[in-house]
Amino acid sequence: MADAWDKVTVDQLRVGDRVRYRESEFEIARIDANFLGRSSMVCLIEDTPSRWHAYPAGLVAEVERAG
């Protein structure tokens, strides 16, 4: 768990960032662009041995990133 969190928009995220989004905390393993054919959306992918999950998000949505 991180000590400090910064609010950023989704378009500032990179693979490897630890984020809090939609009541979940996870490390981004992959970012799929043009989610559902929309250039304004991405899908943040969490992929660990214990869990896989996809989080659709608009590029301008705010998330918390570990600082």
Image: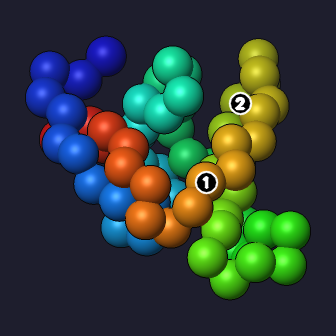
Q: Answer whether residue 56 is visible to the viewer in this image.
A: yes
**Left/right of residue 22 with respect to residue 46 in the rendered view:** left
Up the image or down, 23 lies above or below 12; here it is above
Residue 48 marker: 2
Q: Nearer the viewer, residue 53 or 51?
A: 53
Q: Residue at x 19, y 33 (%)?
A: 5
Q: Residues within 10 Å of mark 2 (few under 14, many from 20)?
A: few
Q: Is residue 33 above or below residue 29?
A: below
Q: Amino acid at mark 2?
A: Thr
Q: Which residue position is annotated with label 1?
A: 57
Which disc is residue 25 wearing? none
Residue 9, by quadrant, is bottom left
Q: Quadrant of the C terminus?
A: top left
x and y percent of residue 37 in the render? Answer: 85, 78
On the image, the x and y values in percent for residue 52 come to 80, 31
- Where residue 24 appears, x then y in whole percent? 54, 22
Q: Is residue 13 left or right of residue 27?
A: left
Question: Which residue is farthest left?
Answer: 4
Disc 1/disc 2 C-alpha distance (Å): 20 Å
> Does 19 sit left or right of 59 as displayed?
left
Q: Look at 36% across and 67% down and name the residue there.
A: 12
Q: Is residue 18 above or below residue 13?
A: above
* Tag 2 secondary structure: loop
Ranked by sequence position, the earlier of labels 1 and 2 is 2
Residue drawn at x 76%, y 42% as measured from the top left: 54
Q: Quadrant of the N terminus?
A: top left
Residue at the right extreme? 36
In this orientation, does residue 30 appear?
no
Amino acid at the residue labelled 1:
Ala
- Dot 1 lies on which element? strand
